[in-house]
Image: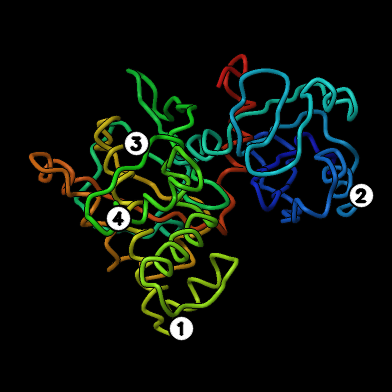
Amino acid sequence: MHPQRLLADIGGTNIRLAWQASPTGPLNDTRVLPCAQFPTVDAALLAYLQEVGVPTPREAAFGIANPVTGDAIRMTNHSWSFSQRAVREAFGFERLVVINDFTALALALPLLTPDQLRPVGGGAAVPGAAIALLGPGTGLGVSGLVFPPGSSLGVPLSGEGGHVTLAAQTQREFDVLGILQERYGHVSAERAVCGAGLVDLYHALRRLAQRGGKEISSAAQVTELALQANDPLALEALELFCGFLGSVAGNLALTLGARGGVFIGGGMVPRLGTWFDQSPFRARFESKGRFQSYLATIPCWVIDPGATPALHGASRALDIAGSDV
């Protein structure tokens, strides 16, 4: 088979790649490569094509964890920067579409099957209502889908909702966010609800406790301490993380009127397994005063990342007329 499309989902930590022989064909030779192993995105793409042994496809679509506002791309949570025009010319692509990674994931939401989703409370989705999407990983991605009349697959939203200001709901949260404010100035949702954010939450709690805890450097270490060793500070950090995620998700659901449901992507939440279901997430999602009953009916789902849905969404972006996504 001759590849027609090269697809990439570019995060701050990993780049996922695959190719299609036709727009409706299956994904072939899916690979996950660490971004840190390559000095440029060009080097990563070239290494992938050489590894799987296929010629350069005619078209390409990238979902990238970054705003896409023009030709120049400079990643927020990684060192890569590139010109879309230069990449297109270097590889000889007839077409190259670059969109935000969560915009790509949003495009894939109508294609997901029940076995790729785990429900986390709520009622039934309202057909045709807006859908919200967010997910913590290296950063915090935010998007959604709206359904104008006659649209069955929806129109994706492209924004940077992960950088909205994060608010405290309790004195403990206020104290923790005060420590983050000392370090960062503006405390966005992403400062707490991402991998590095979980580490910062843990160390903030260590400082407030003025005792105990361990010096850690990764979200995986916090999660292991919490779920395997029942470390009190790590457990509290994870509960804060899930509570903040619930608050942000509830805000997004209210903003979009997302009675079609809220989808949680990214790499972090799936690793928490069923513990997440009894975490503070759902209670905080619904904790919006007079609109508690409104949010209680909205279903939430955790997306299985093993299905690489953002790659399917990137392919869909090539099919949208004019690639105007």
Query: Counting residues from the N terminus, which is met first, the one under dot 4 or under dot 2?
Result: 2
**Do labels 2 and 3 touch, CB within 8 Å?**
no
Q: Residues within 10 Å of mark 2 (few under 14, many from 20)?
A: few
Q: Residues within 10 Å of mark 1 (few under 14, many from 20)?
A: few
Residue at 56% x, 73% y: name it.
215
**Do labels 1 and 4 touch, CB within 8 Å?**
no
- Which mark is drawn over residue 228? 1
Q: Which residue lies under the disc numbered 2?
A: 50
Closer to the observer: label 1 or label 2? Answer: 1
Query: Counting residues from the N terminus, which is met first, the one under dot 1 or under dot 2?
Result: 2
Q: Is residue 236 left or right of residue 72?
A: left
Q: Quadrant of residue 63?
A: top right
- Which mark is drawn over residue 173? 4
Q: Could you give the CA–CA distance between mark 4 and mark 2, rounded to whole angstroms?
A: 49 Å
| Frontmost residue, 91 versus 182 | 182
Closer to the observer: label 1 or label 3? Answer: 1
| Frontmost residue, 251 versus 178 | 178
Closer to the observer: label 1 or label 4? Answer: 4
Q: Could you give the CA–CA distance between mark 2 and mark 3, rounded to whole angstroms?
A: 38 Å
Query: Counting residues from the N terminus, which is met first, the one under dot 1 or under dot 4?
Result: 4
Q: Could you give the CA–CA distance between mark 1 and mark 3, rounded to whole angstroms?
A: 34 Å
Vertical arrangement, residue 48 with respect to residue 210, above or below? above
